[in-house]
Amino acid sequence: MNLPLRLPRARVRRPWRLAAETSALLIAVVVAFPLYWMVLSAFKPAGEIESSEPRPWTLAPTLDSFRRVFGQQEFGRYFLNSLLVAGTVVVVSALIAFLAATAVTRFRFRFRTTLLIMFLVAQMVPVEALTIPLFFLMRDAGQLNTLGSLILPHIAFSLPFAIWMLRGFVKAVPEALEEAAYMDGASRSRFLWQILFPLVFPGLVATSVFSFISTWNDFLFAKSFIISDTSQSTLPMALLVFYKPDDPDWGGVMAGSTVMTIPVLVFFVLVQRRLVSGLGGAVKD
């Protein structure tokens, strides 16, 4: 008996799906274009950068801008300072946020709701409005011209968002799991670090990405709190060496910005899997 041949059906995309994909592609191009132009300008010779007819390509790439960046005497120190500040902020804020999120989720105490609302209100205050009060606070504490003046404010600004986000992850862990651990003889500290911490780790990674990026790219605090001791400066301050009002070195600025972007990309690539699951938002029961 001969069976009729069935031809594979052609996949017909719905118009709304095609429009959504096209819109996403256009948005991606718009977002990525400044990065492309930054990297392109870093490899362009000075004549093409200053040309009145800019082109989105170059036929004579050069590393002169990068040589000027790495030839700067304090560039390596600035790079290490940025790594130290960003790494300290990420680790300390993640640990404090984890403990605080566990406390406001698992324990009931007075003013708990008020405390959570204060976390949200703290995020609404613009950083620029607090820079001057923070300057006097750091001056009175003797922290001006030190890396501590950059670490402490960034930890404070990272905590509200991190605590609020991690609260959802801690709340998603069933209380039955905690009770079962106690019945098996686990102490509170053992449950906290060996059971709860691995379950909310994707959320910690997600918050760490935002903390790292905001700290790494900070210019306002570095400009305000590091006044005279340039050895305590970070990478964003290094770009000022190439920016002169009368004769700015745009090649050096773009090359320095490209070098600054690399650690962020490396950090993102290392945590991207955890980041996706972290932004997904919940652990399974």
Image: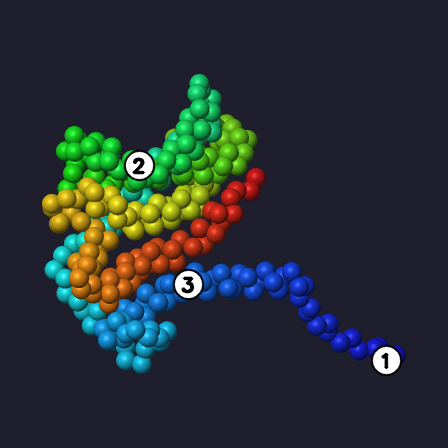
**Marks 3,2: beta carbons within 8 A:** no
Q: Which residue is mark 1?
A: 2
Mark 3 or mark 1: name the one nearer the start of the chain. 1
283 or 133, nearer to the observer:
133
Residue 57, above or below 230: below
Residue type, numbered disc 1: Asn
* Camera-side mark, 2 or 1: 2
Q: Earlier in the sequence, mark 3 or mark 2?
A: 3
Q: Residues within 10 Å of mark 3 (few under 14, many from 20)?
A: few
Please say whether residue 185 is visible from this viewpoint: no
The amino acid type of the residue labelled 2 equals Ala
| Residue 274 spot, x, y in % from top left | 44, 51
Query: Of residues 57 and 175, which is closer to you in this image?
Result: 57
- Give residue 50's quadrant in the image: bottom left
Q: How is the image coloured?
A: rainbow
Horizontal arrangement in the rendering, residue 188 relative to residue 135 (left or right): right
Measuring 46% from the left and 35% from the top, which residue is drawn there? Answer: 167
Quadrant position of the N terminus in the picture: bottom right
Q: Nearer the viewer, mark 3 or mark 1?
A: 3
Q: Are marks 3 and 1 in contact (CB under 8 Å)?
A: no
Identify which residue is drawn at 49% across, 37% down.
168
Q: Looking at the image, can residue 113 be seen?
A: yes
